[in-house]
Amino acid sequence: MVCWVVCWGPGNNNYMVVSPHISLITSAYRAGRFLERYTSHVLQLAEALSPKKLLVEVVIVLNEPSPEERQMIEKLVANAHETGGLTVLPIFVERETLYASWNRGIQASSSPVIGFWNVDDVRYPEALNEGYQLIGQGCDLVDFPYAVVLREKWMGLIPHERHVTKPINYRPPEISHRHCIGPFFLCSRRLFDQAGLFDKHFRISGDLDWSMRPSVRGCHFCPGNQVAGTFFHHGSNLSSTLNPREWVEINTALLRQRAWDRVQPAPPDEMREVWQSWGNNGVELPAEIEAQLWGEGAAERWQSWRRERRWRDIKQLPRSAARFVIDHTGLRPLLARAGIVRATGESQ
């Protein structure tokens, strides 16, 4: 593995050179189309937090960066040096998994509070300040509501956007992929000391696996009130895409916690290969669970389950058509006042 680290710190005379308060870790691969907006938001975030005397460290792990990507990050480093209140630490590596990059960022960071920032998303300063204060008061893990922009094509033809707000869904006592940690959570460094880093073998669901560990579910969890950021859902996302690999990894995380009744059908050959090669974590499956996942008839169960999900999506098309008409004719505010539909941006 080849790795180069370059770091510039705050250069503005209005700031003392002190350790940053919050470290935000970004992993990027072939992200050139997002980087210009991302670097702009990084600078805006640091500027918004500077009146609160919160210093931000951004650790950017770039996988196989292009010359153009390097140039954009070097420009961010220079701007951070001029602005002050912001430390940017770029790390250039060969291709690795998202969670290997996150682990690398955690180990390279220096703040007591750690969070993550997808290069195509936006983080809001109010939630960072709230999370920092809560962790300073003794919380180990803080999750937040967040906005989602769904970029879709109606009937596969007409592009449109849908805006919703997702409430906090994480419920530490429950072991379920339906109650996973949100994308904008913050946690204390001591929680990683207790729970360990992410499992780098995961490609999609490593944060789900981490959040299910007993030491994480048993930590001092605090819900935040501020909307933490905007998550852009599009074709390049790793998660929530119905990728068969995602269900293999969700099952792996559930099986590690012996949540036998929570597993879903998955591609049997890949499920068995993942579990037997790296996924089992020393957990021995009951014979009936092995049979369910990759025994006789498992492939048929997987295909049947996929068809059921597709049919469920097809049955939603009339509702999607109605939503499209309401959103593109300006009727939503009027219908929302009448109590017929939700206002734009409300939870769904």
Image (cartoon, rainbow, N blue to C red):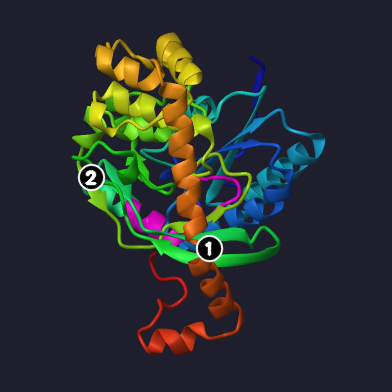
Q: For residue 243, which quarter of the picture? A: top right
Identify the residue shown where x is 45% and y is 35%.
304
Viewer-closest of 233 and 153: 153
Q: Residue at x 41, y 79 (%)?
A: 341
> Is 229 part of what is drawn in magenta?
no
In which quadrant of the rendered image does the C terminus lie? Answer: bottom left
- Labels in figure, total: 2
Q: Position of residue 102 (x, y in %)?
A: 50, 31
Checking the image for residue 328, the label placed there is none
Give the quadrant of residue 347: bottom left
**Residue 18, above or below 344:** above
User: How many residues crowd around disc 1 within 10 Å: few (fewer than 14), some, or many (20 or more)?
Assistant: few
Relative height, residue 246 to residue 197 (above, below)? below
Three-letter code for the amino acid on which mark 1 is drawn = Leu
The magenta stretch is 116-131
Can you say which quadrant of the picture contains the N terminus? top right
Q: Name the residue under label 2.
A: 221
Tell me the residue that label 1 is attached to: 317
